[in-house]
Image: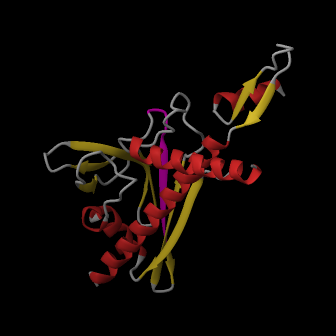
Amino acid sequence: MSRHLKVLRESGLVEESHPEFDARVRIYALKTGPMTELKRWLEEAERLWAEQLAAFKAHVERGE
Amino acid sequence: MTSKVFLAIRVQAAPRRAFDLFVGEIGQWWRPNGLFQTTPRAPGRLAFEAGEGGRLTETLANGKVFEIGRIAVWEPPSRLVFSYRQANFPPDLQTEVEVRFEAFGEETRVSVEHRGFDRVPVGSAARHGFPDQILLMRLADFWRAHLASLGGLA
């Protein structure tokens, strides 16, 4: 379990904190920022290819 | 989480012709794109070097050549796979594009799968690999949403 959490932490998807009263306790919280960024990358990539494929189709069919 | 983009379109041409135009005339049909700019400079002209290991390059107005990727799979007229990297990608982000050309009656179905957006690049968490200007817009969205939820609580 802690290994899985380590991977998530290293990839920036969760953040770790300790409560002041007990350093042994670790609190993990999901960071929405990186997830949102990933989603945006994908949305932008999708928009890019939609545009490029439309341009490609126009090019192919213009040259008939 | 899916980390790839998949799109398909049908074009009025046989697979062979679609493949040849995709590779051979990319410099004529590719449209410069705001965010997915391959380099920070004014867009140049894209070109493939045919065959496995061939480069996909962008030649800028000043004559400089930027390598976007290399062809990993060259299977005319049905399949093409190449690596894809933009100048603004973080160093550890490698993506790959697979293009398939399938006969569909008289036409060809051209599909693109762009994959490799698997992770938030380690070590660039502050910027998330985006150009500053874009990141600022994203942060603005982030704070707007947070402030709105705080407002709801008040």
Q: Position of residue B24 (x, y in %)?
A: 28, 63
B14 or A22, which lies in front? A22
Q: Position of residue A57 (x, y in %)?
A: 38, 76
**What is the magenta segment's predominant secondary structure?**
strand
Question: In the image, is B87 to the left or to the right of A23?
Answer: left
Q: Residue at x 47, y 44 (%)?
A: B135
Colour scheme of the rendered structure: secondary structure
Q: Residue at x 28, y 48 (%)?
A: B57
Residue A51 location, quadrant? bottom left
Q: Residue at x 45, y 82 (%)?
A: B107
Q: Position of residue B131 (x, y in %)?
A: 40, 43
Tell me if residue B92 is in the magenta stretch. Answer: yes
* Magenta region, residue range: B91-101
Q: Position of residue B103 (x, y in %)?
A: 49, 77
Q: Residue at x 49, y 57 (%)?
A: A44
Question: In the image, is B137 to the left or to the right of A38?
Answer: left
A21 or A41, which lies in front? A21
B101 or A57, which lies in front? A57
Q: Is residue B76 above or below residue B150?
A: below
Q: Is residue B144 above or below residue B127?
A: below
Q: What residue occupies the far left of the structure in this picture?
A: B62
Q: Is residue B138 above or below residue B123?
A: below
